[in-house]
Each structure stands twice: as structure tokens, then as C-alpha cells.
Amino acid sequence: MLAYQNMNQRQRQFYDQVKNASGQLNLERRQIGDEEAKAIAEALKVNKTLTYLDLHNNQIGDVGALAFAEALKVNKALAEIRLWANQIGEVGAQAIAKALKANTTLGTLYLGENQLGDAGAQAIAEALQVNTTLPKLYLRENQIGDVGAQAIAEALKVNKTLTTLSLYQNQIGDVGAQAIAEALKVNKTLTELSLWQNQIGDVGAQAIAEALKVNTTLKQLYLWQNQIGDVGANAIAEALKVNKTLTRLDLYKNQIGDVGAQAIAESLKANTTLGTLSLGDNQIGDAGAQAIAEALNVNTTLTELYLGENQIGDVGAQAIAEALKVNKTLTTLLLHSNFLTNAGTTALRQTGSTICQFESAFARLDQQRTPSPADLAQIAARAAANAQSPPSATPASEIQQLRSELAAKDQELQQLRSELTAKNARIDVLERNQAASESLSNFDGPIPQVPLATLISATNNFAADSLLGEGAFGRVYGASLPGPRVAIKKLSAESIQHYAAFQSELKSLSKFRHPNIIVMLSYAEEGDERCLVYEFMPNGSVRDRLARKNNTPPLTWSQRHRIGADVARGMHYVQTAFPDHALFHLDLKTDNVLLDAHFNAKVSDFGLVRAAQHLDDKSYLRTQTVQGTIAYMCPEFLEEGRMTIKTDVYAFGMILLELLTAAKPGARLKKDARNAVKNQNAIGMLDSALTPTEAERESVGNLVALALECLDEEANDRPSFGSILVQLDP
């Protein structure tokens, strides 16, 4: 026991704050170590009104955890404590486990991102066998393997209160998964189970599938980024035919191919409860997509389907397009980063559906996943295996025909690459005009409408040699109108969704006038044809410059720091320009941050912007249509469609990490940053192209810390753009 008179000044400050606290208290990122934790624990022993205590991202170790454990044995008020992202090991976990046997009020315990290991997991499992009040337990990223998972599974067989269990980003394999599956056969309370980013293969998936046939409570199951292939997918499909409770199944980033997809498609014809299915980043091609399309013709419950980052070509896309004409329940469909050409995208556009998001892998200037000749060969082989050969065709002639088609495709691809390289080189040479840039930045007044004929003439009827790139809502062309060079976005005429994007962007940019927001110069609208005319940004996107596209030199440290400040400044303006409205960009990413001739950054692409009246820090707006880029989506938006004024802050955090590392965005980059901070090696993340000074090395750590604050899973814990600006641009 630590007496008050023996506490130092900092300990007394925390003791007094906790002792007198009521309701919720946030003490995250306060550099609280074991000594401060002991004082806080003493306060918890006497406090009778504090129900929520957040201590994540501190430096609390086993000594501090031991102190908290003693407090939890006597505290009768605390309902939720968050201790994730600290330094608690198995000794601390064992102490907390003992406290859980006595505590009767704690409802939610966060212990993720510590170092509990199997021994810590075993101790907590033992406590779960007797605890009767804890419904939510989060143990992600704790080096828990099969031994720990087996212990937790045994506890699940007798526990009567746990509803949410998070074990993702651990080291659980098939043995652990089999044990958990056995527990699911008898457990009657668990509704949400997260096992993603472990080491579960087909054997583990088969066991879980058998459990799903008899389990009557589980609603959400997350298995993404494991090692599940077609065998495991087949087993899960059989379970889905009889399961009556599962509403969300996430199998993203496994090893599922057409065979597994076909099996799952068959199950969708019978299943009546599944609302969300994620099969993104697998190995699904046209045959799998065709089967899924057939299922969509009859399924009446699925509302969200994620098929992005697979190997689906035009045949699969056309089948899905036909299904969309019939299906009445699907509200979200992601097909981005597949192998679609104009034939596939046109088929999807012509459905008139507004729910589908896709990209062309051949035509996009900034595409990161262009199919190689080997990819094309794989697609052709799959098509050949699933096609009906003409009666007159012989195997030899069919092979020769496929080879000829592949050679032609490869030649087209090389030609496109050469043209794009030449155009970017021409842009870099011709478009560094400071005076023109400054005059554009000072543009003000209503956005004028221009005749469509003017834009047709300037682009030579939107000729291929004027094409700069293609995005989700249309193609972008370069042109020279009277005055400086401009960029013209021509929206696709077939889709209602693209018309909504046109209206949204036109309305937003007609109100915005800020140096860090792209300037819209004019627009054209005649019949179904709609175009938006922007200032031209000669240095392209931040993503292209970080990737050093066309062998451009790396961005300097000062340029990267300024880009971060520019984006924060622009977004702060977007969120504060209208006092009675909160605005959400919802597609903030390095592809949509453009650089002028002097590398000043401007936020662009407001096609997904949403507005809400009278939204404060605690409020949110919900949407049924989640659009954008997954790597930049915060958890509450991706999983629940909840938008807050901190939604875009999460995306900004990912942008900061990209600026620091030049790496591609995603969960892996976020995890690497957290590990670097834990190991006090933030400088090790820095882009190898940079050689920072001593002063710059210090600022690297500050920027990584800021990025992780922005990437906090809790929206309320993320900083505002205003406070970000104070740090980036004091």
C-alpha cells in the first residue's frame, strides 16, 4: 500500500484526480508508468463514482498492473478499464486475473497490445471460469498462441457472461482454432469473435465451420488475414447453409479461390441471416464471381459484399452487373482493384446502380495493381477452363488463339505505360509556372459554366493522348484553355452515382476558397455529359511523388512536413468554414492530395463529401453506403457506417505515416509504427531516401506519435484538425 504522504508530487496529482473523478476519466498518453499507476490504484480503492477509466498508450508494466489488480478486488464502481498499448506481461496479467475472480462490477476490460503471452492468457482463462459479470474482453496483439487459446476455449465452455472476445493479431493456429470451435458448440453467450490476423488454416476453419452448424448465438465472426483456402471455405459454406444467427462474416485476405467462392455462393442461396460478407484480397476470378452473381439473383438478406483486390475480370463483372438488375437488398458492393477493362466497368455503369465501387486496372494513371503478363495468362487459363469450346476448335488452335490475345494485351499495356510516362515527363517540364499558379489560387467568385464544346475542342474530343488518368467517378484529361493549363474531369454518363458525385463536388468547391483546397475554375453540363474543370497541378499526387513515379526525386523532409501541415490546414478549413454544418471528405488519401509547381499541397476529389447539421464532438451521422478506400477508413466508419468530425482525422494519420515512410497505407503500416514507438525506434521507419539532420530526427518521433494519435481506434481520442495544426504549424 502506498500512503499519500509517501507520494511524490506527480503521484499526488494523479491520486487526487482519480479519487475525485466521477463518470468517465481519460488518462491516455500521459506517460504514466508504474509509480503513477500505484497512486492511481490507491485512489480507485476509495473512489465510488468513477465508472470508466482509460489508461491506454502509457508505460504501465507488471508492477502497475499488480497495483490495479489489488484495487479491482475492492472497487465497486468501475465498469470499464482500458489498459491496452502498455507494457503489461504475464505477471501483471496473472494478478489482474485473480482480481477478476473477486470483482463483481467490471463489464469491459481492454488488455490488447501488451505482452501477456500464453501464461497470461491461461491465468485470465482461469478467471473467466468463475467471473460472472465481464461481457467484453479484448486481448488483441499479445503473443497468444495455441496454448493460450486452448485455455480460453475451456473457459468459454463454462462462462455465462462473455459476449465479445477479441483475440486478433496473435499467433493462434489450427490447434487453437479447433479448441475454440469445440467451445462454440456449447457456449450460449458469445455474439462477437475476432480471430483475424492469426495463423488459422483450413483445418482450423473446418473445425469452426462444424461449430457454426450448431452454435445459436454468434453473430459476428472475423477471420480475415489468416491462411484459409478453398477447403476451409467449402466447410464454412456448408455451415452457412444451416446457420441461423451469423450476420457478419469476414474472410478478407485469405487464400480462397474460385472453388471456395463457388461453394460460398451456393450457401448464399440458402442462408437467410448473413448481412455482410467480405471476400476481398483473395484469389477469386471470373468463375467465382459468376457463381456469386447467380446467388445474388436469389439472396434477399445480404446488404454488404466486399470483392475488391481479387482477380475478377470483365466476364465476372458482367455477370455481377446482370445480378444487380435483379437484386433489391444489396446496398454496398466493392469491386475495386480487380482486372476490369472498359467492357466490365461499362456493364456495371449501365446497371444504373449507385452501390458499386470499382476501378479500371488498365487505364488508371495511379493504379497500383496493373495485371502483369503472368496475371493475364492466369485469367486466360481460368477463362479457358470455364468456357465451352466451339465444336470446330481443336486444343492446339485454342491455345494459339489465347497466346495471340495475350500478346496483344501485353503490347497494349506496354504502349499505355509508355504514353503515360511521356505525358508525365511533358507535364513536369512545361507546367512549372509560378505566376499562373498564384493567379489560380487567388480565383474567387461563383464557378462559371462553359459550353461543353469548348472542352471537347480543348481535349480533341477527349482523345486518348489527352488522358491523364481515371478514377472512381470518371476520367481526367489535360488541356490548354485560354490562360494556364487545366485538368478536366469527365464524369461517366451512365451512372446515377457519378451524377451525385458531380453535384456534391460542384456544390462543395463552389463554396471553398482556400490555398490548400483545389480550385474549380468552371464546369460544363449538357444532357448526360458533365465535366469539372480544375487548376492543373504539375507535380501530381503525393502518392505518385512518394512512389517516385517516372523516376522523380524523393520529397525532401521539409516538403513532407509542409505537405502534412497543408493538408491539415485545408481540412481544418473544410470542417470550420460553415459554423452550422459539419463536413466529411470521406476519401482523404495521398492519391487525392495534389502538388502544385512549388510542392504546395491541395486537397482534391470532394465527390463523396457529406454534410450534417449541428454535429458536435460526441455526435455522429450514420450511412448505409460505406464508400472510400479501406486503408484509410476508421473502424467505426468501415464497420458501422458512423461518421464523426474525427473520421477524416483517421485518414490524415495514415497520410502522415506515408509521408514519413513512403510505404503504402494499411494496417501493417499502422502496426509497424506502433512497434517502432514501443521499441523507441521511430527513426527506423523513416524513408531510406532521407538523411535527416539531428533536429529533423527529433521531429520524426513527434510526427509518428501524432500519426498514431490520429489513428486511434476511438474517435473521441483522436485530435481535431485544429489541434493538429498547432503541432504541425505553430
Image (spheres, rainbow, N blue to C red):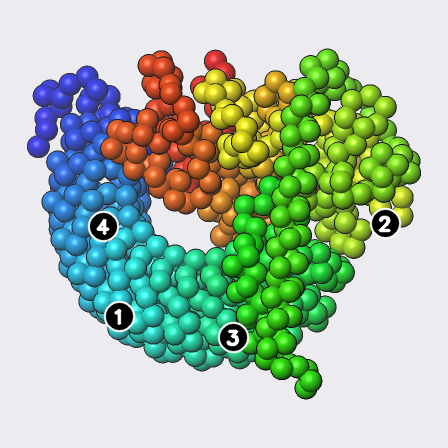
What number of labels is visible?
4
Relative horizontal placement of residue 248, taking residue 329 as reference (left or right): left
Question: Badge 2, how many Cα within 10 Å: few under 14, some, many 20+?
Answer: few
Q: Secondary structure at mark 3?
A: helix
Work out whether 344 lies above or below 26.
below
C-alpha distance separating marks 2 and 4: 56 Å
Marks 4, 3: nearer the viewer? 3
Q: Secondary structure at mark 2?
A: loop
Q: Which residue is mark 4?
A: 143
C-alpha distance separating marks 2 and 3: 38 Å
Quarter occupied by the N terminus: top left
Disc 3 and disc 1 in contact, CB within 8 angstroms: no
Q: Look at 39% across and 74% down and name the residue there.
A: 231
Q: Identify the amino acid type marked 4.
A: Gln
Q: Which residue is mark 3?
A: 262
Question: Badge 1, how many Cα within 10 Å: few under 14, some, many 20+?
Answer: many
Relative horizontal placement of residue 719, taking residue 339 as reference (left or right): left
Q: Nearer the viewer, residue 62 or 460?
A: 460
Residue 178: numbered disc: 1
Of the two numbered discs 2 and 4 on the same chain, state the one appearing first in sequence.
4
Q: Look at 21% across and 38% down and name the residue there.
A: 87
